[in-house]
Image: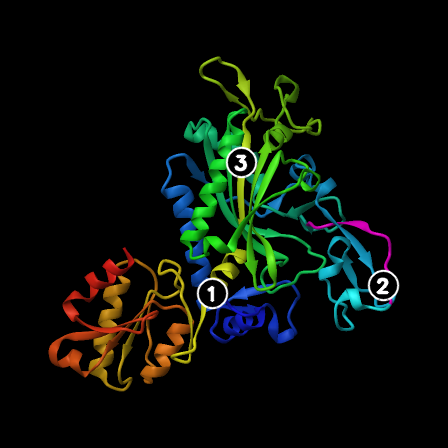
């Protein structure tokens, strides 16, 4: 069972410390959100699961952590300065701004759907660049500036030769990065689905020209399976092949993994065949290579972004397959899938996959003012925490029923209760989140029980 509407998720997220509106005490800022104590753990676990799958479990991917500030020259040759824009219209009556291609989903600031607005007196569409600028240096005179990167991909491409030279990689291989990106969205909406500051999980996978289509299919299948492993049911995912007229300027083909969010079917992740556009755009001596993509003549680059084929000794520019996912959209999908109303037991719970749960276990002393129980609970907590499987929490508020309900709601798989039987016969009570089943486990065996559960 998923959430019936977005309001259920928003309420849970704020009440339990997953996500807060940013700058809330001053009225907030549209399209910006902060992840609270519980949310930051869930977000970190989702990113860790992605990194483990993409980097640690493979032998052909390297990692990168590059700067947010990006040279205008990089984004000039990538095409962002010319093409990274949305069509913008203004209402002549209320002065509100809307994306021209999303009027049907837009809300009138005076209330209700824009479709029902009586005025509909809109300006002609005009391009609106989505990139944020910031001044570089002590004087803001417009002569020296950088962009806050609109995607993590471009710094992967401009670091291509550095990584090849330092690792001796040859295609097929990939470069992975998780990091912040910024887009000045005209109409941010739907909670954390479309925001102005967000994180991306991106892989740029470099392959020989001619092998790109088979690798594209490989990564589409791989990414569909990965989302299923995170608890997003396969039947809730739909694969959409983007029509040629809607493809980005760099794309030969793109498949979007679509998910039924509370507000409707939208993109969860895109997997694009970017051809040789990116490396071809940023390379010097472009005419020396048989670049298939249409690229801007580059007279600024100092580096040849090509690989020598060891068999025929010819140089070529690799094609790129790019699986790209937004962390916030992933968190929203995972939360929505996990959200469950247990009517029989009158409780709300998050049936998160154990590896994603913000807390792996809560250790609960039955009485918070009993030093023997509290001391034993602290020892158990430290023992479980030392296993390195994730965060373990001491829950010392004294009301066992409320503690169980709280941890059901934030998705904690196990609650370990330290009661008076613990002091008498050295056993603890372990409660399962999903089944509510309780069993006695020897104090000396709790660490191995816990390890087996997560491994």
Q: What element carries label 3?
A: strand
Asked if residue 234 is positioned above or below residue 286 in the image, the reply reads below
Q: Residue at x 21, y 63 (%)?
A: 449
Residue 300 x %, y %: 67, 29
- Which region shows up in magenta? 119-131
- Give the x, y percent position of residue 306: 55, 24
Q: Residue at x 26, y 82 (%)?
A: 366
Q: Mark 1 points at which residue?
A: 39
Q: In the shown orientation, is residue 256 left or right of residue 376?
A: right
Rendered location of residue 238, percent (x, y): 54, 50
Q: Whole-Å distance between the Cαs marked 2 and 3?
A: 42 Å
Nearest to viewer (mark 2 / mark 1): 2
The percent coordinates of residue 307 (x first, y second) are: 51, 23
Q: Earlier in the sequence, mark 1 or mark 3?
A: 1
Left or right of 314? Residue 438 is: left
- Mark 1 or 3: the one toward you: 3
* Extreme-top residue of the structure: 312
Depth check: give the residue in front, 383 or 347. 347
Asked if the residues shown at circle 2 and circle 1 are in contact, with their CB atoms under 8 angstroms apart, the answer is no
Decide which of 10, 202 is in the foreground and name it: 10
How far is mark 1 from mark 3, CA to CA? 31 Å
Q: Is residue 20 magenta?
A: no
Tell me the residue that label 3 is attached to. 321
The answer to whether 106 appears left or right of 58 in the picture is: right
Q: Is mark 2 on a helix, strand or loop?
A: loop
Q: Is the magenta stretch mostly helix, strand or loop?
A: loop
Label 1: how many Cα within 10 Å (few below 14, some 14–19, many 20+): many
Give the residue at mark 2: 120
Is residue 123 found inside the magenta-colored segment of the image?
yes
Q: In which quarter of the image is the C terminus?
A: bottom left
Left or right position of 245 against 427: right
């Amino acid at each position: 069972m998923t959430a019936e509407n977005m309001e259920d998720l928003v309420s849970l997220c704020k009440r339990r410390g997953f996500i807060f509106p940013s700058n809330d005490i001053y009225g907030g800022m549209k399209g910006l959100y902060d992840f609270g104590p519980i949310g930051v753990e869930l977000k970190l676990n989702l990113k860790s699961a992605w990194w483990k799958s993409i980097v640690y479990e493979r032998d052909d991917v390297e990692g990168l952590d590059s700067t947010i500030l990006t040279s205008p020259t990089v984004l000039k040759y990538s095409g962002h300065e010319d093409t990274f824009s949305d069509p913008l219209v203004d209402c002549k009556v209320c002065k509100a701004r809307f994306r021209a291609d999303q009027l049907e989903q837009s809300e009138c600031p005076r209330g209700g759907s824009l479709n029902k607005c009586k005025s509909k007196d809109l300006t002609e569409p005009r391009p609106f660049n989505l990139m944020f600028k910031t001044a570089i240096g002590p004087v803001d005179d417009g002569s020296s500036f950088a962009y806050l990167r609109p995607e993590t991909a471009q710094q992967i491409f401009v670091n291509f030769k550095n990584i090849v030279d330092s690792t001796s990689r040859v295609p097929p291989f990939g470069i992975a990065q998780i990091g912040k990106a910024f887009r000045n969205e005209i109409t941010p909406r739907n909670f954390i689905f479309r925001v102005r500051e967000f994180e991306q999980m991106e892989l740029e996978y470099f392959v020989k020209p001619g092998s790109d289509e088979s690798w594209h299919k490989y990564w589409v299948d791989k990414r569909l399976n990965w989302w299923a492993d995170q608890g997003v049911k396969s039947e809730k995912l739909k694969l959409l092949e983007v029509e040629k007229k809607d493809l980005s300027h760099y794309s030969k083909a793109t498949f979007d993994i679509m998910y039924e969010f509370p507000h409707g079917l939208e993109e969860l992740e895109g997997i694009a065949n970017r051809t040789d556009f990116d490396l071809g755009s940023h390379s010097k001596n472009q005419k020396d290579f048989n670049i298939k993509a249409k690229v801007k003549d580059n007279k600024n680059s100092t580096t040849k972004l090509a690989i020598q084929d060891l068999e025929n000794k010819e140089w070529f520019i690799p094609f790129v397959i790019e699986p790209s996912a937004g962390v916030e959209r992933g968190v929203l999908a995972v939360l929505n899938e996990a959200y469950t109303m247990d009517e029989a037991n009158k409780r709300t719970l998050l049936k998160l996959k154990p590896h994603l749960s913000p807390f792996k276990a809560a250790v609960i002393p039955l009485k918070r003012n009993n030093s023997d129980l509290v001391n034993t609970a602290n020892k158990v907590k430290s023992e479980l925490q030392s296993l390195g499987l994730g965060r373990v929490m001491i829950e010392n508020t004294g009301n066992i029923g409320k503690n169980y309900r709280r941890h059901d709601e934030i998705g904690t798989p196990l609650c370990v209760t330290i009661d008076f039987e613990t002091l008498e016969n050295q056993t603890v009570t372990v409660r399962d989140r999903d089944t509510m089943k309780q069993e006695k486990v020897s104090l000396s065996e709790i660490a191995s029980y816990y390890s087996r559960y997560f491994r």
